[in-house]
Amino acid sequence: MATINQTQTVGAMVVFINGSADKSQYRKFIIRSNKLGDPHTMSEVLTRRFRHPEWHLPDLVVLDGGKPQLSVCRPVIPASIPVIALAKKEETIVIPQEAGFQELRLDLSSPALFLLRSLRDETHRFVNRFIRTRSARLLLHT
């Protein structure tokens, strides 16, 4: 998610296949909801994403965040699709369980953690480019 003064909020999704970015499947979303906060905007993005049966279903959804994002977003993701979150503070992987959450900390040199960080960083790059482009366009039209 990216926002300017809590008024222009956008979200994005990226797709990795076999460890590599598939930019043809990236998507941008302009947030329509008035609810503030990353968990709610992320939930809107996911809700809208799963309304597209023509888009391939993922093998795994990785959320940028932790327990709050999982708590709000898990209900909008089809139950057949596994979901995890990558919490930035300590690069903790958060996995939803029936009775709460499991936290997993991989070694910082782990290839799996490297892949998850790459996915998150690519999402940030993509969404930040979108908000910059959108902001510049809006400034030109004011």
Image (cartoon, rainbow, N blue to C red):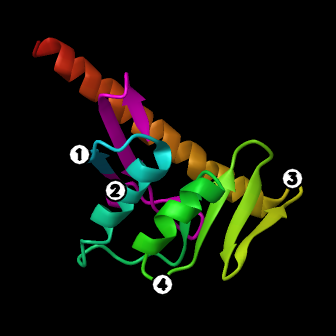
Q: Return the residue at label 1.
A: 32
Quote the CA–CA distance across marks 4 and 2.
Answer: 17 Å
**Which SS class for mark 3?**
loop
> Do the residues under discs 2 and 1 have CB atoms within 8 angstroms?
yes
Is 101 contained in the magenta span? no
x, y percent for residue 123: 49, 46
Q: Residue at x 28, y 42 (%)?
A: 34
Q: Residue at x 78, y 60 (%)?
A: 111
Q: Is residue 16 visible?
A: no
x, y percent for residue 138: 18, 21
x, y percent for residue 22: 43, 60
> Sequence-wise, which precedes: disc 1 or disc 4?
1
Is 18 contained in the magenta span? yes
Quote the CA–CA distance across marks 1 and 4.
Answer: 25 Å
Where residue 127 sits, quadrant-wise, is top left
> Sequence-wise, which precedes: disc 3 or disc 2?
2
Task: Decide: few, some or many residues near mark 3? Use Cα within 10 Å; few <14, some 14-19, many ≥20.
Answer: few
